[in-house]
Amino acid sequence: NVKEYLVYLKKHKTLALIKDGRVIGGVCFRMFPTQGFTEIVFCAVTSNEQVKGYGTHLMNHLKEYHIKHGILCFLTYADEYAIGYFKKQGFSKDIKVPKSRYLGYIKDYEGATLMECELNPRIPYTELSLIIKKQKEIVKKLIDRKQNQIRKVYPGLTCFKEGVRQIPVESIPGIREAGWKPSAKDKCKELKDPDMLHNMLKNLLAQIKTHPDAWPFMEPVKKAEAPDYYEIIRFPIDLKTMTERLKNRYYITKKLFIADLQRIITNCREYNPPDSEYCKCANTLEKFFYFKLKESGLIDK
């Protein structure tokens, strides 16, 4: 099934690709300096040497040759098997050369696709691979340098263990320092002004703390008063801890704040009997803070 081709016309030129003393590929072309383009008549690399970059190497040398001779356009008729190769080399089916410039100069092949490649005289095509490799190395070094500047190990997230099912990306410690920025869509999900949310939560927490039934939840449970508390309750939380978290800007979303409030109530019900004084306080306080959340517009009414 090996097909052999012979192209020999005096007006044509051929660029040969030689490896270990034998020809493994080549491109035959005809230059039309008066028309400002070159026709690529035939281009091939032997089958056992394909997919090794030789086709690109060959085309890059052809491009350099034409830049030196002031011709910055290639035209070629590509069969269906060659279209992919020519696309990789910068050829397009979108022909910008006026038809009047090539009509009657190049042969019109039936069943083939006319493709064009515009050359950029500022690009050193034969050095392109090396330049791209160096660029990648430079970018990698810049990334490494930036990472070293901001490298910091943050403690792992604990909010998921505490019952929170999802959190916004911006609440992950260090994410902003690493260069992440929220999209316009993400910004609309929460209050646009973080300080506004902070002040609302601060005001709400102050009201909860002054509620007459908040007294059992003001501070962490003392082990002396309930020795088995921390064996039963895996994720303890209290109003004092919430105040510290608020001060440290932990509550960047209302979800985190509401989750901690609800955890106080859930923990109380889990540890204490339903008819205990503590559970009665929890029931009243829960109704109060949900009323306040609705009143402030933090949750739907």
Image (spheres, rainbow, N blue to C red):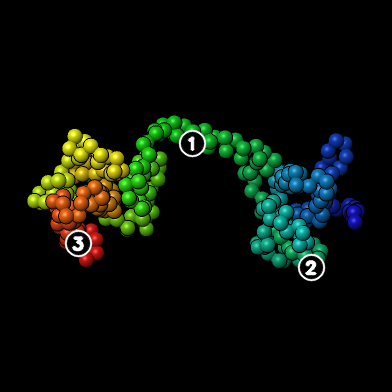
Q: Is residue 173 above or below residue 119?
A: above
> Marks 2/3: CA distance?
71 Å
Residue type (three-letter) at the residue carrying disc 3: Lys
The residue singled out by tag 1 in the image is: 143
User: Where does residue 160 sit, x and y in percent of width and height?
Assistant: 35, 47
Q: Residue at x 81, y 44 (%)?
A: 49
- The answer to whether residue 110 is visible is yes
Which residue is most to the bottom?
110
Q: Earlier in the sequence, mark 2 or mark 3?
A: 2
Quick one: 156 or 286, which is closer to the camera?
A: 286
The residue at which mark 3 appears reads as 294
| Front one among 260 and 184 | 260
Q: CA distance from mark 3 to mark 1?
A: 46 Å
Residue pictured at 71% horizontal, 66% vertical: 99
Indicate left or right for 173 with 13 as reference: left
Above or below, comparing residue 212 to residue 175 in the picture? below
Quadrant, the N terminus? bottom right
| Percent of width and height locating residue 62 | 75, 46
Q: Earlier in the sequence, mark 1 or mark 2?
A: 2
Name which residue type carries label 1: Ile
In the image, is residue 184 above or below residue 162?
A: below
Location of the C terminus (image quadrant): bottom left
Q: Secondary structure at mark 3?
A: helix
- Read off the residue under disc 2: 111
Mark 1 or 2: the one toward you: 1
